[in-house]
Image (cartoon, grey):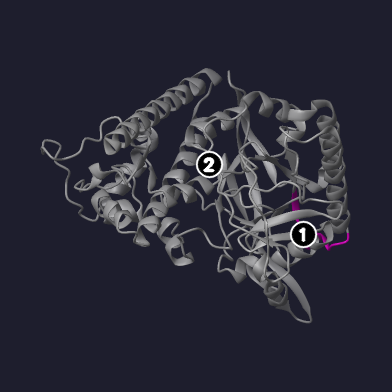
Amino acid sequence: MKKFRVEKTLKTNSGSIRLGHLQLPVSSSGVVEDGDKKRSSERKNDYGTPMFFLHTQTGSIPHITAEVLQLIYPTSTPSISSQTPPVQISLDSTTKFMDALKKFGKGVGKFVGLSDYPIFLTVHDPLYLLRSGHNDKFGIALWSRHGRRPLSPQQYHEAATAFKPSICQVLSDYDVNPKISGTKRLQKSLDRAEEYTSCIIKQQETEPKNEALGLFITVEASWFQMDEGRATKTVLKLLESQHQIEGVVLAGLTDRFPKKDVEVKKNPSGKGSSGERERVDICQALDVDLLEKILQTLPPGLPKYIPGPLRIPEMMDLIAKGVDIFDSSVASRMADDAEVFLLDSVEALLPSISSTVVKLSSSLNEGLPERESNEKNQPSREDEEGAVVSLKNKKYFDDFGPLSSFCVCYTCRKHTRSYIHHLYATDELLGPVLIQIHNLTALDRFFSIMRTLIKECDTPESLQTKLDLIRNLLNNRILRQAEEEEKVAVQAHV
């Protein structure tokens, strides 16, 4: 039985935008004793798409504990969130506790304290670049802060069995760089993709029906950049066992490799290699033509997931093309850099959608001081609402209002911009925590708005008009913010 269904599709000028539902099981109490037998205790959650996965590192959401997560997505009190996102856990960031996890035997969700969330097991952390030249016929290279670790299809199957996720990504030989790779390297990657997919499907066939994993095949964008014909043939072969394929990971549309070679040092322990990992920059533009080529080869009944840090305008463009799932890695990256999502102008533009938020905001307000716009030293917020702003900017030194006038998150109800600016100025750990709380709330709000728009719009024309209005608004705000920050940087040098 397929876990994804499309509820509504509207064909706009940009593509086919759709509203869907993804059903994901989650283990409520691990393995339950039932007489002399053991059975998995599961409940099924229905998630509306477009949606996002909660990005994690080493099994935890960056800057956020499980208790703090309850502040963002409370289970016992009303929330503006229509759904609590599933969790994405990457294998490369969790290899250190693999042996302990196997002995634990109850899955990674219970192991890391996230047993109430469906788990999506991916291979790579979308926030970090990969390194070329280390995949071979035995498997691929995993990269983490502890260095390089080889991973064969058999080892990956054993890891997935220990993790007990709701769904998992199929291995792929990612080492194809159109700038330096030749046709032989491309063919190796294509052949290994078929081999890896066939291997894990055969292994899944031997598992009991209730323990079989939902599989997301991996399609590398670089295949289509180098040879669209061969790439299409390979993708069609990967999809031959469609009854076991639950979705598609569109990998490589954001940055994959460092712009220059990074020295890989030998690990002192003698195992693999060590070295600092380089972070992925927030994606500013995507190759839309390349994406359309890939989407044409994929069946419409499968959800499509693009990993990596993407700005909201880019997410909007991808949603309009028919992409269903993203992740919150952009929020993690922004929290590190003191950057904040602001959707105030979008909320003001769509009052019917925002009415519930405004009502909750007034009822949950913690009594922050009112902002007096006529005060001489009060910084202006004109042209910034709806943009990404940096709280490191000195103009927020005496800004005593909340991050957002529309947001009801813990941060906006309890703390001012001035205080959060102070936390970053003094390198306090609380700064990224507070911004992460807000950014995850804002990201969830954005996807809720997208789903509501798709559901409420009756014609493609009305939906296209609203999407264009929001996209232009956000892009203009971001451009103005970039110009302002450039002026500040120039003045600092002077």
| Residue 248 part of the magenta segment | no
**Can see residue 364?**
no
Which quarter of the figure has residue 184? Answer: top right
Does dot 2 land on a helix, a strand or a loop?
loop
What stretch of residues is rendered in magenta?
206-215
Which quarter of the figure has residue 222? Answer: top right
Between 373 and 185, the one lying in front of the other is: 185
Residue 154's place in the image compared with 34, above or below, is above
Question: Residue 260, position in %: x, y?
Answer: 62, 41
- Quarter placement of the C terminus: top left
Question: Residue 237, position in %: x, y?
Answer: 87, 38
Q: Indicate the amino acid at tag 2.
A: Asp
Q: Please count the marks in the image.
A: 2
Instruction: Compute the Cα span from label 1 to label 2.
Output: 26 Å
The residue singled out by tag 1 in the image is 150
199 left or right, relative to 123 = right
Question: Residue 86, position in %: x, y?
Answer: 58, 54
